[in-house]
Image (cartoon, grey):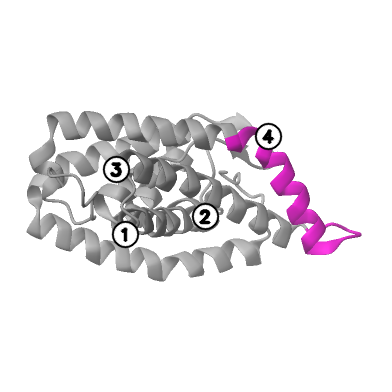
């Protein structure tokens, strides 16, 4: 999903940075409030951010100028909500660009928008819908993580298609091409990410139930520990 440094035209890079900025400003306010009202959640936030960093560093070659990997955003969103994960995702992408040459500074806005912002919003919407429908905690976390991952790659495909439309079929043909290529690697990765997120959540419920109960994100209403 990470679009590499210098790959997007300058106007697109600036446009995606501008689009991401208000979401990050909102996320910073949410993060400050979380740290002020629930300082005990710092350890879990650090672990969630580390989870994003590790998973999103496991890249596989994919569409030219980009790559495939899990994102980890969906898991963190089920704990902290989307706003805080906007910031966590941005920080992870910034460090990966500076330390690992994974992604880039000029494409930081586009990568943040697809992974942290859209991925977070989709995870949050799916998780809320699953809890309203009274699905099990495991099913809610799995669906949130898997669909957040897939949504990230849909947006990345649209970003690439917008920047590099097909000479004959334009934006639509280019989007179909990018989506079809990503599908080979990303569909299995999304399922694996969903299963891994459920596993980690179960471990947290077993060993850090009090800390989970203090977080802002709603959990399974059928779970007495939530």
Query: Residue at the spot x=64%, y=41% of the render?
Result: 66
**Nearer-the-camera pick, 209 or 117:** 209
Tag 3 residue:
137
| Residue 50 belongs to the span the image colors magenta | no
Q: Nearer the viewer, mark 3 or mark 2?
A: 3
Q: Nearer the viewer, mark 1 or mark 4?
A: 1
Task: Name the side, left or right, on which 43 lies relative to 129.
Answer: left
In the image, residue 205 sits, relative to residue 163, either above or below, namely: above
Q: Are marks 1 and 2 in contact (CB under 8 Å)?
A: no
Q: Residue 48 appears at what percent x and percent y? A: 28, 40
Q: Residue 199 appears at what percent x and percent y? A: 32, 29
Read off the magenta span: 165-187
Q: Residue 137 appears at what percent x and percent y? A: 29, 43
Residue 43: name its quadrant. Answer: top left
Q: Nearer the viewer, mark 4 or mark 3?
A: 3
Please say whether residue 64 is visible from this viewpoint. Answer: no
State the predominant SS element of the stretch in magenta. helix
SS type, badge 4 = helix
Query: Residue at the spot x=66%, y=58% of the render?
Result: 158
Tag 4 residue:
184
Tell which circle, 4 or 3, labels the residue nearer the N-terminal end.
3
């Amino acid at each position: 999903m990470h679009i590499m440094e210098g790959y997007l035209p300058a106007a697109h890079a600036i446009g995606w940075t501008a689009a991401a900025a208000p979401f990050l400003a909102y996320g910073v306010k949410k993060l400050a409030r979380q740290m002020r009202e629930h300082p005990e959640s710092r350890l879990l936030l650090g672990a969630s951010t580390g989870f994003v960093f590790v998973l999103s560093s496991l890249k596989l070659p994919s569409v030219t100028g980009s790559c495939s990997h899990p994102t980890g955003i969906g898991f963190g969103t089920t704990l902290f909500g989307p706003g805080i994960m906007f910031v966590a995702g941005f920080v992870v992408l910034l460090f990966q660009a500076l330390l690992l040459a994974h992604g880039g500074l000029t494409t930081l806005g586009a990568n943040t928008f697809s992974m942290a912002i859209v991925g977070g919003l989709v995870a949050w919407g799916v998780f809320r819908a699953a809890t309203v429908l009274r699905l099990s905690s495991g099913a809610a976390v799995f669906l949130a993580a898997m669909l957040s991952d897939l949504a990230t790659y849909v947006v990345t495909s649209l970003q690439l298609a917008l920047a590099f439309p097909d000479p004959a079929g334009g934006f639509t043909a280019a989007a179909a091409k990018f989506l079809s290529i990503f599908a080979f690697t990303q569909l299995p990765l999304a399922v694996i990410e969903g299963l891994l997120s459920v596993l980690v959540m179960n471990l947290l419920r077993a060993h850090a139930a009090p800390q989970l109960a203090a977080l802002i994100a709603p959990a399974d209403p059928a779970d007495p520990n939530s």
